[in-house]
């Protein structure tokens, strides 16, 4: 992988596009559980061309009222390009929709600071893996994450209003 180049996974973006319908069916079937899952987020962006709401299921890290996602497919991900056009998003948090603002972080030092604060394994968004990533496996996870984010945008999402019950909930 060349510094500043596109990650190999970006070339696999066609696979993600191909499974959109099954993913939407899975979300519809398990929506209630996914809305409350601590390491998944249903992110709703505004379509950059149509202006219509677009929803995607993504692995994430949550802490201190903030949420972190990493674009596996780099700039090819439609949800990321939608955020570039409009930073206002909605996310699910504790079963509620929360208005939020998304910031794309491309600066390597900024990305490293965020993953140090919110380490997670985007390829395995299950509670026990994430607890290990933030605990005993943190010395192994952080070097891997530093390489993972080198050519990928990191997105920091924060709620736009801090009204009670409207903040991004933290994992259990």
Image (cartoon, grey):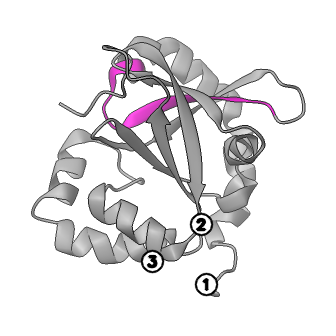
Inter-mark Cα distance, 1 to 3: 10 Å
Compared with 28, 118 (above or below) is below
The x, y position of residue 7, in whole percent, is 63, 72
Q: Which residue appears at 49% of the width and 41% of the height?
A: 157
Choose between 103 and 170: the one closer to the eye: 103
In the image, residue 106 lies in the stretch drawn in magenta: no
Choose between 160 and 32: the one closer to the eye: 160
Q: Is residue 110 left or right of residue 38?
A: right
Whether residues under marks 1 and 2 lie with C-beta atoms below 8 angstroms apart, the answer is: no
- The residue indicated by pointer 3 is 147
Looking at the figure, which quarter contains the C terminus?
top left
In the image, residue 38 lies in the stretch drawn in magenta: yes
Dot 3 falls on a residue whose secondary structure is helix
Q: Which residue appears at 83% of the width and 36% of the height?
A: 48
- The residue indicated by pointer 1 is 1
Total numbered circles: 3
- The residue indicated by pointer 2 is 106
Choose between 118 and 137: the one closer to the eye: 118
Q: Is residue 33 left or right of residue 64?
A: right
Task: Work out which residue is located at the far bottom of the displayed protein and give it.
Answer: 2
**Magenta span of residues:** 35-47
């Amino acid at each position: 992988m060349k510094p500043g180049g596109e990650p190999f996974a970006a070339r696999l973006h066609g696979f993600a596009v191909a499974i959109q319908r099954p993913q939407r069916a899975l979300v519809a079937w398990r929506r209630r559980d996914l809305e409350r899952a601590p390491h998944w987020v249903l992110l709703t962006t505004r379509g950059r061309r149509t202006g219509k709401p677009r929803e995607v299921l993504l692995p994430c890290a949550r802490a201190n009222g903030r949420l972190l996602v990493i674009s596996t497919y780099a700039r090819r991900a439609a949800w990321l390009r939608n955020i570039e056009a409009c930073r206002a998003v909605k996310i699910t948090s504790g079963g509620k929709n929360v208005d939020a603002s998304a910031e794309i972080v491309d600066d390597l030092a900024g990305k490293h600071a965020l993953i140090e604060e919110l380490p997670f394994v985007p390829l395995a968004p299950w509670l026990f893996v994430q607890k290990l990533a933030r605990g005993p496996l943190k010395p192994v996870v952080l070097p891997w994450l530093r390489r993972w984010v080198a050519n990928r945008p990191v997105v920091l999402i924060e709620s736009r209003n801090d009204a009670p019950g409207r903040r991004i909930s933290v994992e259990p």
